Image (tube, rainbow, N blue to C red):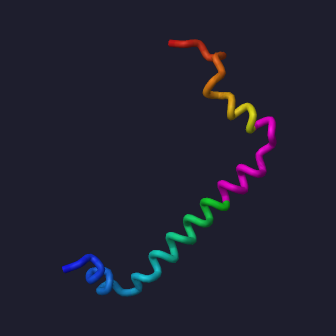
Amino acid sequence: MKFINYLKTIQDVSIYPMVSLILFSVFFLAAAYLAFRTDKQTMDAISHLPIDNDAPEK
């Protein structure tokens, strides 16, 4: 039996793709909002974190 046949037997299975799309959209919009809302100085400081050598090596 194919997987699609199992999905057909579940009642209201069509709601799951819509819920996942809404959750993804909310998360993406929140991430985009926070990225565009952050000021340039903070973004510059964050972008230089991996290459800064201020931390002592262990």
Report the front residue among 4 and 13: 4
* Res 28 quadrant in image: bottom right
Q: Residue furthest left?
A: 1
* Res 47 quadrant in image: top right
Question: Considering the image in quadrants, where does the N terminus appear?
Answer: bottom left
Vertical arrangement, residue 39 with respect to residue 5, above or below: above
Residue 41 position within the rendered picture, expressed as x and y whole percent measured from the top left:
80, 35
On the rendered structure, is 36 left or right of 15? right
Vertical arrangement, residue 47 with respect to residue 3, above or below: above
* Res 6 quadrant in image: bottom left
- 35 part of magenta stretch: yes
Residue in view at x 23 percent, y 78 percent: 2
Residue 30 position within the rendered picture, expressed as x and y whole percent measured from the top left:
67, 58
Magenta span dominant secondary structure: helix
On the rendered structure, is 42 left or right of 3? right
Residue 31 position within the rendered picture, expressed as x and y whole percent measured from the top left:
65, 54
Magenta stretch bounds? 30-42
Residue in view at x 60 percent, y 60 percent: 27
Vertical arrangement, residue 7 with respect to residue 37, above or below: below
On the rendered structure, is 46 left or right of 3? right
For the image, the number of numbered tags is 0
Residue in view at x 55 percent, y 67 percent: 23
Residue 8 position within the rendered picture, expressed as x and y whole percent measured from the top left:
32, 86
- 23 part of magenta stretch: no
Residue in view at x 75 percent, y 34 percent: 44
On the rendered structure, is 46 left or right of 8? right
